[in-house]
Amino acid sequence: MDETISIVLFSGTDDKLQAAAVLTAGAAALGRPVKILLQYWALEAFRADRIAADHGLAAEAGVAGKAAFAAAAKAGQSSWADTLRVAKEVGEVDIQACSQSMDVLKLKQSDLDPLVDGVEGVAAFYINAGEGQILFI
């Protein structure tokens, strides 16, 4: 069985980006390769000029979720981007921008943070995912 974990990251809210980053870091720490495909709103969050911005939370987080997220940040929890940077240092993590999403949003790879390794299409993502799990966030 292929141990690769592949994540299609569609959401661009900080809570979902953080969830993806934590899953990635955990898998990388266990020696499992991780492949991430950034689509639409997640891709927007990876723009070099927006990666450190507040991307809000999913609607279901509500006021309590916002307060909990703010408290975790105040206590020193790493940002999702920093967690992904560490995951890339620890293990095999490949982050690709979806070529169709790039076209729709009129982005070039130079618009993206260096965390993004390249641009690929969906077919390449599936080929690279192999027989491993695919998660959608």
Image (cartoon, grey):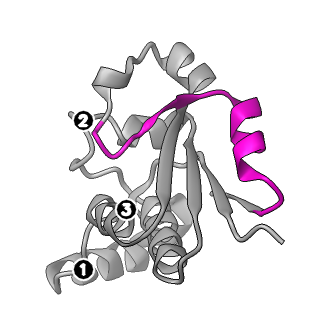
Local crowd size for mark 1, using a 10 Å CA cut-off: few (<14), some (14–19), many (≥20): few
Q: Is residue 130 above or below residue 126?
A: below
Instruction: Identify which residue is drawn at 51% across, 39% down.
Output: 96
The percent coordinates of residue 109 (x first, y second) are 37, 23
Q: Which residue is mark 1?
A: 77
Q: Nearer the viewer, mark 3 or mark 1?
A: 3
Mark 2 residue type: Ala
Mark 3 residue type: Lys
Instruction: Identify which residue is drawn at 53% across, 77% down.
Output: 31
Q: Which residues are magenta?
A: 113-132
Q: Which residue is mark 2?
A: 48
Q: Quadrant of residue 75?
A: bottom left
Say the numbered circle drawn on residue 59: none
The percent coordinates of residue 40 (x first, y second) are 54, 33
Q: Nearer the viewer, mark 3 or mark 2?
A: 3
Q: Quadrant of the N terminus?
A: bottom right
Q: Which residue is mark 3?
A: 88
Q: Secondary structure at mark 1?
A: loop
In the shown orientation, is residue 112 left or right of residue 15? left
Magenta region includes residue 60: no
Q: Is residue 55 above or below residue 39?
A: below
Q: CA distance from mark 3 to mark 1?
A: 18 Å
Q: Is residue 97 above or below residue 58?
A: above
Q: CA distance from mark 2 to mark 1?
A: 21 Å
Q: Secondary structure at mark 2?
A: loop
Mark 1 residue type: Gln
